[in-house]
Amino acid sequence: MRKLCWFLLLAVSCSLSAIGFAQYPKTLTDDLGRKVTLQAEPKKIVTMLPSLTETLCAMGACERLVATDSFSDWPDSVKKLPKMGGLFDASSEKIVALKPDLVLISVYGKLQEPLERSGIPTFAVKTESYEDIFRTTRLLGEILNQRSAAERLVAQIQQQIYAQETRAAKAKDRPTVYFEIDPTPYTVGPGSFIGVLIAKARGQNIIPKELGDFPQISPELVVRKNPEVIVLTHPGAADLAKRPGWSRLRAIQTNRVCSFTGEADNLLSRPGPRVAEGLKLLIACLHPELK
């Protein structure tokens, strides 16, 4: 009888594992290359990147959030949560006081050391390429024990992206594009998730791949490349013509400059579940003739 029970338990365990009910503790590798062991399914989570907040909520796990970074503002329900600061001014003391099960952080912050010293587990994420969006979603599914929800979200995002690509395919031209994140100027390479969106919107990024995904460039490079369209995610469109040589750019002479700020900036700049809405904005900018 005991042997029969043992086989039944084994069968149930295998079935649960197959449909996504993974066992804890479990060990996963984060984007800093660290082995992070989760002793139990995390129920009290702090997210320190807006894209992570949005992805977690889009998977139906908003109720697990006890705090976020200062910039997380979607969906509306997260606005009322305690804010723990930004990438470089986060308050580890405030986070520790909440006693979360897990803190999801950026690889570029410095939170892992003080939080780990306080016994708070952290998991570092780097979402910069287009494929990273789906990899991160699936990774969150593993962390939250929500594989099915993660796969549904991946499929939903990809379907939405495909719908926008289908619209963009009707465009008659592929204009050259310069995308500026800030006036420093920082821009995007073709390998970044924004660079991929530009290509999917039937635009041609003027930034060479070898410069990296998010390079700081010389303004003279833009003058040499002379783009047909300029896309900004800062409110500096009025000052572009004042830069040396920029008044002669085709984009400025034909008034093909799109400046996205506020919510529109969020849609373009966050590698998360609303990325198709960012693509829609790019298509409208590059191909205003498409309805």
Image (cartoon, rainbow, N blue to C red):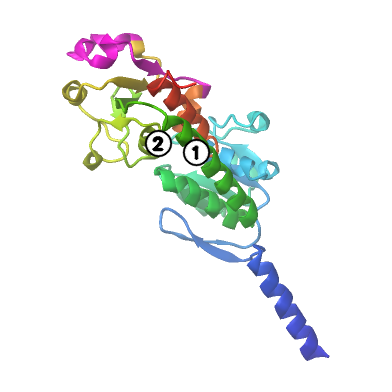
State the SS at label 1.
helix
State the SS at label 2.
helix
Give the percent coordinates (x, y) of residue 196.
Answer: 37, 39
| Residue name at image x 35 percent, y 16 percent | 257
Which numbered disc flags the more N-terminal residue, 1 or 2? 1
| Residue name at image x 68 percent, y 31 percent | 77
Q: Which mark is residue 183?
A: none
Q: Nearer the viewer, residue 38 or 73?
A: 73
Judged left or right of residue 22, residue 261 is left
Judge whether residue 51 is colored magenta.
no
Judged left or right of residue 289, residue 59 is right
Q: Is residue 13 above or below residue 237?
A: below
Does residue 267 show up?
yes
Q: Are marks 1 and 2 in contact (CB under 8 Å)?
A: yes
Q: Nearer the viewer, residue 198 or 123?
A: 198
- Identity, as a three-letter code, of the amino acid under mark 2: Lys
Judge whether residue 248 is colored magenta.
yes
- Identity, as a three-letter code, of the amino acid under mark 1: Ile
Judged left or right of residue 278, residue 176 is left
Count neighbours of disc 2 (C-alpha within 10 A) and say few if under 14, some if 14 to 19, many if 20 or more. many
Q: Give the CA distance from mark 1 to mark 2.
A: 9 Å
Q: Which mark is residue 161?
A: 1
Q: Which mark is residue 200?
A: 2
Q: Nearer the viewer, residue 260 or 285?
A: 285
| Residue name at image x 51 percent, y 61 percent | 28
| Residue name at image x 24 percent, y 9 percent | 242
> Which segment is the magenta one?
238-263
Give the percent coordinates (x, y) of residue 163.
Answer: 52, 36
Give the percent coordinates (x, y) of residue 49.
Answer: 51, 38
